[in-house]
Image (cartoon, grey):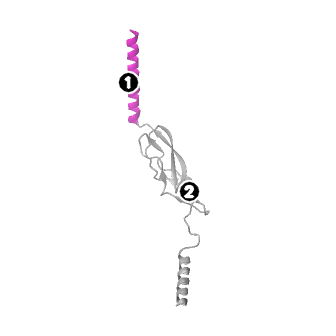
């Protein structure tokens, strides 16, 4: 009975080593970099970030690397300010920053111009009234 148990335990150990390679722990990410920018890098104020087309290179602590285009997280969902926005993306906790351009849409530009004109006329009217 002891021999059968010993053979059975040995067989289980051999099968376990065959199925689970020694040192097969999860790989940790050591670095990421952008290999292909997203398809969209110019936005209007108020638009949501779209990472379609983004590809990043990933280096692992075991010395391997690969190109990935899924599992990428983004810290910004909506772009609220005009100018260059720096979006932080990350893959398995490792961050990288990508720049995108944010501008006003034509409607937003017209509304801004009308507001500026209205302010100009209010100030001008006040100055004319004060002059009399």
Q: Does the magenta run of residues contain 49? A: no
Which x, y percent locates residue 58?
56, 58
Marks 2 and 1, the one that precedes in the sequence: 2
Q: Which image quarter is the C terminus in?
A: top left
Would residue 120 be found to the left or right of residue 58 on screen? left
Tell me if residue 76 comes above or below residue 116 in the rendering. Answer: below
Which x, y percent locates residue 96?
55, 50
Looking at the rendered structure, which numbered label has been put on residue 87? Answer: none
- Mark 1 Cα shell of 10 Å, populated few (<14), some (14-19), many (≥20): few
Q: Does the magenta run of residues contain 114? A: yes
Tell me if residue 86 comes above or below residue 2 in the rendering. Answer: above
Label 2: which secondary element: strand
Q: Which residue is mark 1?
A: 118
Identify which residue is drawn at 43% across, 36% down. Answer: 104
For the residue pair 45 and 109, the one nearer the viewer reads as 45
Identify which residue is drawn at 48% across, 57% down. Answer: 71
Span highlighted in magenta in the image: 106-132
The Cα atoms of the two marked residues, 2 and 1, are separated by 51 Å
Identify which residue is drawn at 53% across, 89% down. Answer: 4
Looking at the rendered structure, which numbered label has been put on residue 57? Answer: 2
- Mark 2 Cα shell of 10 Å, populated few (<14), some (14-19), many (≥20): some
Which x, y percent locates residue 89?
51, 50
Identify which residue is drawn at 59% across, 70% down. Answer: 23
Q: Point out the residue furthest to the front here.
A: 2
- Please give the count of numbered marks on the rendered protein: 2
For the residue pair 6 and 113, the one nearer the viewer reads as 6
Magenta residues, dominant SS class = helix
For the residue pair 127 and 1, the one nearer the viewer reads as 1
Which x, y percent locates residue 73?
48, 53
């Amino acid at each position: 009975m002891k021999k059968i148990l010993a053979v059975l335990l040995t067989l289980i150990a051999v099968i376990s080593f065959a199925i689970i390679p020694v040192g097969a722990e999860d790989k940790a990410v050591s670095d990421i970099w952008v290999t292909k920018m997203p398809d969209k890098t110019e936005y209007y104020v108020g638009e949501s970030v779209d990472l379609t087309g983004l590809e990043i290179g990933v280096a692992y602590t075991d010395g391997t690397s690969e190109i990935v285009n899924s599992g990428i997280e983004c810290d910004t969902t909506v772009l609220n300010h005009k100018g260059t926005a720096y979006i932080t993306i990350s893959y398995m906790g490792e961050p990288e920053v990508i720049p995108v351009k944010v501008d006003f849409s034509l409607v937003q530009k017209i509304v801004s111009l009308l507001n500026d004109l209205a302010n100009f006329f209010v100030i001008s009217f006040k100055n004319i009234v004060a002059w009399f």
